[in-house]
Amino acid sequence: MKKEADNQAFTLVELLVVIAIIALLIALFMPNMTGMLQGARTFQCASNLKHIGEAVANHRAVGAGEFAVGGWPSIVLPLLDGQGGILICPDVDPNEEVIAANYTPLETMGQMVFGNGNVSPLAEHPWVAKLSGTQHAAARADGKLSGAESANYWSPPAYVPDANPHIFWLCYEDLHGGDADFKDTMLKITQVGGVSEITFWRGGGTGVSSSLEDCESGIVRSLGTWGGGNDLAEQTDIDPYPFATGGETTYGMNINVVRLDGGTNKILVVDFDEVVVDTDAGAWEDDPSTGLPTFARHGGKMNALRMDGSVKLESPDDIDPATPTVGDRGWR
């Protein structure tokens, strides 16, 4: 008796049923996946704002003086370890114009090149000591950063910003494993208005020449060989070198921040389309296609950071400073 072989192939009807089931599952779960991704971006944005709030609080805590609100990105960036990504909302529309601001990590723009072939970044590094003005003065008072023998084999402290984080020092050891005096070339960096200006200093005699290389323009500023004494001295024969450290942000800061007390419920920073929220500029303008401001990036809402460090997802109408009660209660 002949035994028929089993037919293991799918019929066309069965294949179409399987495809229909898969399509149905995708249709059911895709909105949930989209919502989860949206929620993750909103959460990351809130985390960014919290970091910004902590940087502002730290700036105030060290008594750095009046807060120049128009240049706030360049003020907080050194206190964020140069992480410019924190100033960008992850939910920004690719077609939305980001705001020009005053920051770009300096280490991406140039480097120091020594006559012995060693290369070091414009940043903290095993052979580069990054010091605040206060740390630099303390090291000098302790006899370090000089040509004296007692200054050799020094272990620099980790960088801690002081009352003026826009002025700091980069102190270089040219031998990368030599006498570790970190005085062979010293750069004093002053960051103001989107420009990082570098002046050149030496802490004692050294037979090694060095150069500052601008990696973008290709310009090389030769510092020559320094034969001075053991005292800290500026190389006044070499003009300061400026790096244009401009960048971008997608957040706006309350123009009234300098008059607000910490720990209150007043608004500090929000999703916005300008670097400063002018609370007297009138109602926020809606996008005709959506009926919402372009900066309402999170499902028609926007994140708002308060002076007490809290972040809340808000409706634009609920925090529009043009509404008198809202402006007085939340912004001024």
Image (tube, helix red, strand yellow):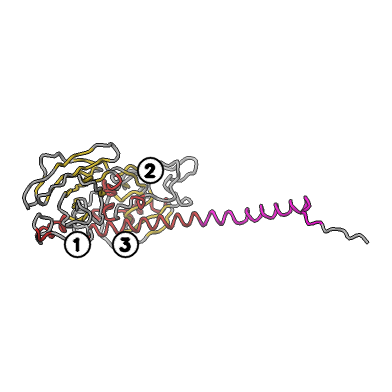
Of the two numbered discs 2 and 1 in the rendering, the one whose residue sits closer to the viewer:
1
Assign a secondary structure to mark 1.
loop
N-terminal-most mark, 2 or 1 = 2
Q: Which residues are magenta?
A: 7-36
Image x and y of residue 223, in percent: 16, 42
Q: Which residue is mark 1?
A: 155
* Residue at far right of view: 1
**Alpha carbons under labels 3 and 2: distance apart:** 27 Å
Q: Is residue 144 left or right of residue 314?
A: left
Q: Is residue 139 left or right of residue 74?
A: left
Q: Which mark is residue 98?
A: 2
Image x and y of residue 204, in percent: 10, 51
Which of 256/27 is in front? 27
N-terminal-most mark, 3 or 2 = 2
Q: Let me know if residue 115 appears in the view.
A: yes
Q: Which mark is residue 308?
A: 3
Specify the quadrant that holds the N terminus: bottom right
Q: Say which amino acid is labelled 1.
A: Ser
